[in-house]
Amino acid sequence: MKKSLVVLAALAACGAASAQSTVTLFGVVDAAVRSVSNKSESATAFGPVYAVKASRTELANSGLSSSRLGFRGVEDLGGGLAAGFWLEAPITNDDGATGVSAFTRRSTVSLSGAFGEVRLGRDKTATVYTEEQYDPFGDTGIGGSLIIDANETSVSGTGFGSNSGYKRSSNMVQYFLPPKLGGFYGSVEYALHERTRTSPDTLAGADRSSAGRHIGGRIGYANGPFDISASYAQNDTTFTTGTGAAAVARPGKISTFNLGSTYDFGVVKVFGIVSRSRDERDALNIFTQTPDLDLTGYLLGVTVPVGPGVIRASYSRVKYDFNRQQLFGAPVADPKANKLALGYVHNLSKRTALYGTIARVSNKNGANLTVGAGPSYASAFNAVALRPKTSTGYEFGIRHTF
């Protein structure tokens, strides 16, 4: 009898503990028929002018929302404290090839309370949270953010292609302000580069590199239909000067500032964002200086509710500034691109939606942006260098969340 009472007490204690903890399986399955056509033409005025078209129609995933599978949980520690975790993996449900093999979307553990939340692990950066929040298409599908694409795409072999930590950063420590601060919200974050230091360091200075380190933060205010926020981030990078045996890795950094806002009038919600990034490079000496590369962009967008659905539209533009110092000859125009996107989402329920999107990107002066994960434009044709001109696409699909 006594042993039975002990067992019953233990079971009751376990039940009470489990009642204070929750674990949730969640995800998105999104598939669409997508068609993208990219056109290029020869980059030189000498010789014949070639126009090359690359096109593909496919069944793709992540047209409206990124397909994913995740686990999240929270435990009530008492006294207003809670511990939580979040593990989220990308999946490719169009072919089933990628499953829960790596939690590269988010993998964090956190402690929260009246003081706010401290979060450790891999997560989105502050600047990308802002970019996605003030774009009607977020960063998904062929209508997704041109500004984010530009920050991740190299131009003429240089530029922001090395900014691998622009969207997400690993080894990050974040702090989020608590809710209920009169509409104010914000966060700060720091990601460790985890590089080994030696003393003395190498002659080339490679041990002084902090590539992989990320510093960022965000502050915003939301009240009723109005929302505005600003964010800043700095990603430490490296770039190479010289070739062959003379190649030397040098430190650099890419800093980004953006400001975005929305206002919901009921019949229409307007979006706007401006962004500026600078790629700063530390050369060996004054004779080998590499000019900074600037990237500016803006977006204007709207969403219009129509019955159970919503119309989405946006226009965005980006421009690269190579800061060229040219004393002789005609000035060289800097690359730039613009994007127009239009779409409709029809909600069949709270978890299931049908959608369609069309989008077009126009490039000038060597910019090489496209509408999404379509075919690459041809880089050469009959040994003639090509430059991308336009990228056009459409997609129609279905998304289900659980």
Image: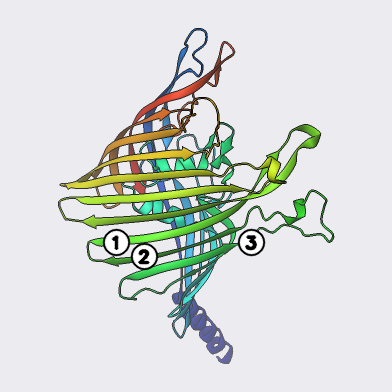
Name of the residue lying farthest toward the right: 200
Which residue in the protein does label 3 denote? 192
Say which label, 2 or 1, has the lower sequence index.
Answer: 2
User: Does the CB distance between marks 2 and 1 fall below 8 Å?
Assistant: yes
Left or right of 64: which side holds 215?
Answer: right
Q: Specify the label residue 227 is tagged with.
A: 1
Say which label, 3 or 2, has the lower sequence index.
Answer: 3
Q: CA distance from mark 3 to mark 2?
A: 25 Å
Amino acid residing under circle 1: Asp
Give the SS element for disc 3. Answer: loop
Q: CA distance from mark 2 to mark 1?
A: 7 Å
Q: Is residue 114 visible?
A: yes
Q: From what the image shows, is residue 258 above or below residue 289?
A: below
Q: Which residue corresponds to the image point at 56% horizontal and 88% vertical from the top-left?
A: 6
Give the percent coordinates (x, y) of residue 43: 50, 19
Q: Which residue corresponds to the image point at 59% horizontal and 33% vertical from the top-left?
A: 157
Name of the residue lying farthest toward the bottom: 2
Which residue in the protein does label 2 denote? 220
Label 2: few (<14), some or many (≥20) within 10 Å? Answer: some
Q: CA distance from mark 3 to mark 1?
A: 31 Å
Marks 3, 2: nearer the viewer: 2
User: Does the CB distance between marks 3 and 1 fall below 8 Å?
Assistant: no
As rendered, which of 68 and 12 lies closer to the eye? 68
Q: Which residue corresponds to the image point at 76% horizontal and 58% vertical from the top-left?
A: 196
As rendered, which of 34 and 15 lies closer to the eye? 34
| Placement of the N terminus among the 4 image quadrants | bottom right
Give the percent coordinates (x, y) of residue 95: 49, 34
